[in-house]
Image (spheres, coloured by chain):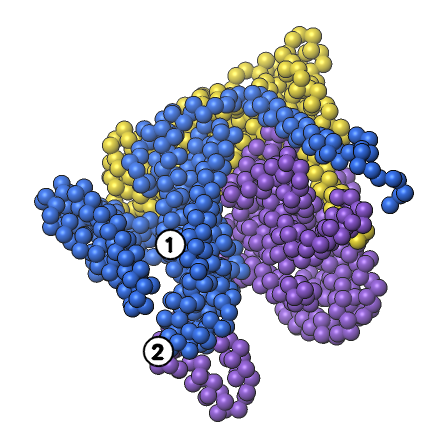
Amino acid sequence: MKRFTISLFTLFVALLLITACAQNQATPTTAPTEQTGAVTEQPAPTPVPAQQEQPAAEGSLLEVVKQRGKLICGANANLPGFGYLDQEGNYAGFDIDFCRALAAAIFDDPDAVEFRPLTAKERFTAVQTGEVDVLIRNTTWTLTRDASVGMDFGVVTFYDGQGIMVRKADNITKLEDLQGAAICVTTGTTTELNLADQMRARGIEYTPVVFETADNTFGAYEEGRCDAVTTDKSGLVSRKSLLKDPEAHVILDATLSKEPLGPAVLQGDPIWHDVVMWTVFATIQAEEFGITSENVDDFLNSEDPGIRRFLGLEGELGESLGLTNDFAYRVIKNVGNYGEIYDRNLGPGTPFELPRGLNDLWTRGGLLYSPPFR
Amino acid sequence: MTAQANLSSDKKSPPAILEWMKENLFTPWYNAVITVALAALIFVVLRALFRWALYEAKWEVVLVNLRLFAVGPYPEEAFWRIWVALGLVGALAGLSWGAWGGRNWAPSVVAGVLGAIVLVLPASPNVKWPLIGVLAAFILTHVASMGRSRLQRPLVWGWVLSFFVILVLLKGLGGSQVLADVPTSKWGGLLLTVLLALIAIVASFPLGVLLALGRRSELPVVKLFSILYIETVRGVPLVTVLWASAIILPLFFPKGVRVDNLIRAMVGMTLFSAAYLAENVRGGLQGVPRGQYEAAYALGLNYYQAMRHIILPQALRAVIPAIVGQFIGLFKDTTLVAIVGLLELLGIALSVIAQPEFIGLQREVFIFIAAIYWVFTYAMSYSSRRLEARLGVGTR
Amino acid sequence: MATLPVTEHTRPPFWRDERVLTVIAQIIFLVVVVLVFTYLYNNVQEGLRARGLTGGYGFLQQRAGFDIGESLIPYTSDDSYGRAFVVGILNTLKVSLVGILFATLLGLLSGIARLSPNWLLRTLVSAYIEIIRNTPLLVQLFFWYMAVMLKFPRVRQAVQLPGPVYLSNRGIAIPWLQPQAGFPVWVGFVVAGVVVGLVVAKWRARYEERTGQSGYPIVAALGTWVVFVLVGWLIAPGTPASVTRPELVGLNFQGGTRMTPEFAALFTGLVVYTGAFIAEIVRGGILAVSKGQREAAKALGLNDVQMMRYIILPQALRIIIPPLTSQYLNLTKNSSLAVFIGYPDLFFVAGTVLNQTGKSLEVISLVMASYLTFSLFTSLFMNWYNQKVKLVER
C-alpha cells in the first residue's frame, strides 16, 4: 500500500518535471524568466541619444535571441522555391535564405537558426505567442495584419499577385470562364478573401473547396476535385512544377490582387523590427552596389565611402541597430545579395525560371529600393 | 451459439467438417443463401484486393520512406539513443515477463525466432544488428529472471524510472557533447506517436485520480469544480482542446516564456485524458463496497489514510482494464495533433503523399499506417484481455 | 483509541473540529483556484493588449468576407461572421444527425449479425469490427476522402446511374424537387401525415398489446403517411414541386441536388466507425438478456425474427441505451475532424473566423459552448428516452 503512495508521489514529481521541461525549453538560458518578466513592466526603450552609446537593445527580442544563441524562424515547409525540406531534410528556399541572412547578421552564422514549419492558419498566433522570433513565410502585408492582428511589417522581400491555375483542356482563358466552377483554396490566407471579393465583383458563381494545408489543396486539384486552384502566382509557379504533368496546366494572366510578401515580427518591438528590415535592405543595397558573396572581400579595400559605411569599415551603422558594424558584410558573405538569393531559388537553372519582373532593382525597372545606408 | 460452433469445429475428421459446415453455413435454408452470396462477395473483393496489392500498388513509397515513418526527422547520428531506449524497454520487458510469468520458455523462444528471421532478412546492418541486440536483451533478462517473483517490486520502480531515463535519452541534455540536444521539432513518426500517448496517460494519472476523488468529495466547492472540469472537457472534441491549448496556453504565461508546440500538444492531451481517467477511476471508486469505507473509518483512519491505504488500491486495481482501454483510445487520438503541425505517424504520412515523385499513392500510404496502428492497438487490447483474465478483475 | 472520557458536551478544539476544517479546506481551495485563474486571466489580458488584440463579441456583426462551400441557409461573403457561425453549426448538426441515424442502423444490423448462427457472416462482421475499431478515425477519414471519394471518375467521365444519378469525384448528383407555388400546402400535408401516422402507430400498438394479435403498427403508420403525401400532392394548387435533374453544364453539374465528396467522406467515415462500436454495444446488450428468455421464446414457438423483435431487443435496449448515448456524443464530437478534409462544419468555420479576426478567446469560447450545448441536448434526449423505455417495464 505504501508502494502505491510512493508511486502516486512519483507521478506527481513526473508531472512537475514535465512542466519544468516546458519551462526549460522555453528559456534555455539561465534565469531568463525573471529577466523578461521584469522587462515587461517597462515599455521598450525608445532610442534616446544617451542609449546610443550602449545600444544593448534591452527588452527587445534581439537581446533574447542573442542570449539564446540562435534564431527561431517561422517558415513554410511545403512551398518549393520559397520554403521546403530538401532531400536531406534541410530547409531551403527563398524565404529560408532570408531567415539565414538574419541569423548571419546577428551571429555571423547562417546556420544559427531553427526553423519552425507553420501552416497559414497558425502563423500569426506563433508570432503573437512568441513561439517564433520572426515570420518569413510568404506572408502578405495588409493593413489589418499590420494594425489589428498585432504584426509589424515594413519591408517587402517579394512582390507577388494572386493568380489562378486551370487545366489547359478546359479552355479557360479569363476569370469569367470560371462560371459555376469549383475552386480549391487554402484557408487562413488573404487568397480566400480576395477570391470571394473578385468573384462577387464580377458576379461569378463558384464553389470554394477549402483546405487546411497547401498540400491538400493542390492534391485535391490534381485529383480533379476542382476546376481551378488559386494562390499567389509565385506559389502557383512553384506548385505547378510539382504536378504530375506540369504542361497540362496553365496559369491565367489575370491578377486578382497585390500580394507584397515580407517578414513579420511582433508589434511593439521597434529595435527587433529594425534589425529585420535592415537585414533585408542590406541584401538589396548589396545588389545595387554590385557586391556579391564572391567579390565582397575585394570591396573591403574600396575607397567609396558609401561602400565603406555599408560594409562597416567606417561609421557605426551596425552598432546603432544593436548589431555589429559589419553585419551587412556577414549577410553578403554568408548568404549573398538579393539577386543571388533570387537566382539560387527561383531564377534560371531552377525548375521555376521565374523572371525578376517587379522583383528587380529600381534602377532596372523593378520595385526594389533600399533606403540609404548612412 | 458461438460456443456450439467452437465445440463442433474442434472435431477434425472430414465428416465432422461437413457436418460443421452444414450446421454453421447452410441451416436453415436462408442461411445457405446468405453463405453463398457472402462467399461470392468475399471472393470478388479479395481477388480485387490481392490483385491490387500484388500488381498495381506501388509500395516503394513506403519502403523508401520507412525511416520517416519510424522516427520522422530525428537526426541519424542520434539513432543509437533510440536503440538504447528500445534495449532498455526490451530488458525490462524480459525481466517483467520472467518475474510475473513464471517458468515459461515461450516468450524467449518467440523472441529467438524473431531474431533469426531478422538475421536472414535483407535489412540494412544499421537496423539489423541493433534490432537483434534488443531481442537479445529481452531473451537474456527473461532467462535470467524466470520465476523470480522477488523482482516484481523493484521492477515497478524500474519502469517508472526508465520512463524518465528514456525521455532524457531522446531529448538530450543542453550543452552535453554525448547527448546533444535534439529539438522537439525533430521528433516524429511512430516514435512521437508512442511518446505522446505514453506521456499523456502517465501525466494525466495523478490529475485524473485527484479529479475522481474531488468529484466524490463531500466538500461542495471541490465537487463542483471537479464536475465542471470533467463535464466540460468530456463535452467538447479533443481537437478543440488541442486547439485551445495551442492558442491560449502561451497567453497564460508571461511574455517571453516560450512554450514548445510539442509541449502544448502534450498538455492538451493530458488535460483531455485526465477528465476521462477521472470518470474511469470514479467507476472504480463506486465499485468499492460501502463496508470498506466504514471499516476504514472504524479503524480510526482519516479521509486521506482511508483513501491511500484502503479505497484507492482496490479501486485502481479494478479499473486497470478501463485505463488500458483509454490508453488505446489515446494512442489512436494522437493522430489529431496534426492540427498543431506535429509530424507524428499521420503527419508524416500526409507529407509523404505530397512528395512529388509519389503523387497519387494515398491508398498505399494510408493502408500502411492503418496497419501499423492496427497492430499496436490490437496487440494492446488483446494483452489487456489476457491481463484482465489473469488479474481476475470482474470475477471477484 | 485513547482513554479520553468522551461526553456529548466535549467539543474538540476548533482546529480539530471536522466541520470547521472542511470549511477552511474549501475556502483555501477556492482561494487557490481564484488566485490561479486571476493570475492566468491577467496574463492573458496583458498578452492580448500587448499584441494589440481587444476583446468582445462585437466582431460577430462584421462582414465575413469569405465564402463557404456548402450551407443549409443562404450565405454569401457579404453576411456577418455570426451567420457564418450559424452555417457551421447547421452543417455540424446535419452530418451528426444523419450520421447518428445511419450508424445506429449499421450498428444494430452488425451487432445482430455478429451473433448469427452463420459462421461466414459472423466472421465477416467480426473482421469489420476489429479492423475499424483498432485504427484511428482520422486515418479512416483521410482514406475515405483521398483514397476513395477523390478517386472516383472526374466530372466529365461521371458514372451515370438510372435516375439520372451521377457519380464523380465532385460528389453525387441526384434529381431533386424544385418547390413551386403549391409547395407550402403540400409540406403541410406531409407534416400532418407524420403526426397522424404516429397516432395510428400508437393505436395499432395498443391494439397489439391488448389482443395479442398482430397490429402491424409500422406498416399502418407508413401507409397513412403515404396517403397523406399523395392526397396533399393532388389537393395542393398547381403542382407543389417539379423535379430537376442534374446535368453537366459547363464545368459542373447544375440542377438536382449534390452531395459533396467532403460530406460523403465524413459521413461514411463517421457511420462506419461509430457503427462498429455500436455493434459491440448491441451484441453485449443482446448477450446480457438471460438465456431463459430465449428458451421461453422458443418454447412459445416464436421464430428467430419474432424472438429478436418482441423478446430480446426490448430488453436489450435498456442495457444498450446508456453506452449508446456516449457513442452518439462521440459521433457529434468526432464530426469536428471535418476540418481535415475540408467539410465546413462548426470547427472549420470557427478556425477561419479566428484566422481572419484574431479573436482567439472569443472564438474558442463560442465553439466550446456550442459543442457543450450539443452534448447537453443529446444527453437530455437520451435520458428522456431511457426513462421512457424503463417505464414500459411491468
State whether residue A130 appears in this view: no
Look at mark 2 in the image and give the residue it sits on.
B30
Q: Tell which chain the image draws in yellow.
A: A
Look at mark 1 in the image and give the residue it sits on.
C101
| Total labels drawn | 2
The answer to whether marks 1 and 2 mark residues whose Cβ atoms lie closer than 8 Å is no
Measuring 39% from the left and 30% from the top, which residue is drawn there?
C81
- Residue A278 image-quadrant placement: top right
In the rendered image, residues at marks 1 and 2 fall on the same chain: no
| Element carrying mark 1 | helix
Amino acid on which the number 1 mark rests in the picture: Leu
- Percent x, y of residue C18: 75, 36
- Percent x, y of residue B226: 62, 39
| Element carrying mark 2 | helix
Amino acid on which the number 2 mark rests in the picture: Tyr
Q: Which color has been applied to chain B in this rendered view?
A: purple
Please state if A320 lies on the left or on the right of B313 as rendered.
left
- Percent x, y of residue A68: 70, 31
Q: Tell which chain the image draws in blue.
A: C
Please state if C192 lies on the left or on the right of B198 as rendered.
left
Question: Please, which chain is the residue tagged with disc 2 on?
Answer: B
